[in-house]
């Protein structure tokens, strides 16, 4: 009678052919995505190769890599999205097998990037807030006033042209008048988001003076 370990070994050696529409497809793309998210470059490259050699559409993988660049890296490394898009374009130009190398390059790059989902979370917060406050109009000072009536209604009144200020930022509050300011984007202390955090604090300090 075969033991459990031996049974598992036999089953693993006799996996069915890669099914692009079946469970193995979803299992392997999950393995690739989570390997990149956890910065395991070698494992990510392995799962990428498994899918390519199994017959997966490289453009499907290219689309997923673009998604990973925005969802798991974002502004922690702004180059990630550019390179993911460039790899897709490269594959479309070269085809297989030459174009696969550009995709493999991006797999490694994304895996070794600093990680942040701050943009993803910020967008979710923004969407939820937008749904709850969809009745709120923009503040009048940032509305254009092309007609006399609009000017009489206060459109554009008090608007400060940011480029005319010393700092290049007027410090105006551009949320709806009846809506308390919300901090939607909360960058992490990793990668380029450290710089983004400094910029946020700088512009918030200018805004708080008004």
Image (cartoon, rainbow, N blue to C red):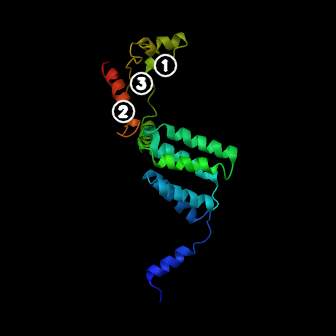
Nearest to N terminus: mark 2 or mark 1: 1
Across and down, in percent, residue 127 comes to 46, 39
Nearest to N terminus: mark 3 or mark 1: 1
Across and down, in percent, residue 61 comes to 59, 52
| Left or right of 175, for residue 7 | right
Across and down, in percent, residue 162 comes to 44, 16
From mark 2 to mark 3, how far is it between C-alphas?
20 Å
Tags 2 and 3 touching, CB below 8 Å: no
- Is residue 31 visible from the viewing direction of this image? yes
Q: Residues within 10 Å of mark 1 (few under 14, many from 20)?
A: some
At a point 44% along the width and 81% down the height, the residue shown is 4
Q: Relative to 55, does residue 85 appear above or below in the rendering?
A: above
Q: Nearer the viewer, residue 57 or 152?
A: 57
Q: How crowded is mark 3: few (under 14 residues within 10 Å), some or many (20 or more)?
A: few
Q: Quadrant of the C terminus?
A: top left
**Residue of label 2:** 197
From mark 3 to mark 1, how far is it between C-alphas?
10 Å
**Residue of label 3:** 174
Q: Relative to 105, does residue 24 appear above or below in the rendering?
A: below
At a point 63% along the width and 58% down the height, the residue shown is 56
- Is residue 184 visible from the viewing direction of this image? no
Across and down, in percent, residue 45 comes to 52, 55
**Residue of label 1:** 143
| Left or right of 152, for residue 202 | left
- Camera-near label (3 vs 1) is 3
At a point 62% along the width and 69% down the height, the residue shown is 17
Q: Which of 14 and 116 is in front in this view?
A: 14
């Amino acid at each position: 009678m075969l033991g459990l370990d031996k049974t598992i070994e036999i089953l693993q050696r006799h996996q069915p052919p890669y099914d692009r529409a079946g469970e193995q497809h979803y299992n392997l793309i999950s393995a690739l995505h989570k390997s990149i998210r956890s910065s395991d470059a070698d494992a990510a490259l392995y799962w990428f190769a498994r899918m390519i050699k199994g017959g997966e559409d490289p453009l499907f993988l290219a689309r997923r890599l673009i998604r990973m660049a925005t969802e798991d890296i974002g502004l922690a490394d702004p180059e990630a999205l550019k390179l993911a898009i460039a790899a897709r374009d490269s594959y479309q130009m070269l085809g297989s097998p030459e174009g696969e190398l550009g995709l493999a390059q991006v797999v490694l790059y994304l895996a070794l990037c600093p990680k942040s989902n701050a943009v993803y979370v910020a967008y979710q917060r923004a969407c939820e807030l937008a749904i709850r406050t969809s009745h709120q109009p923009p503040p009048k000072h940032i509305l254009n006033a092309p007609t006399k009536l609009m000017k009489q209604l206060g459109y554009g009144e008090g608007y400060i042209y940011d480029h005319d200020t010393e700092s290049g930022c007027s410090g105006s509050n551009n949320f709806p008048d009846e809506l308390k300011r919300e901090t939607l984007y909360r960058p992490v202390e990793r990668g380029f988001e450290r710089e983004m955090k400094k910029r946020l604090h700088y512009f918030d300090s200018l805004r708080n003076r008004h």
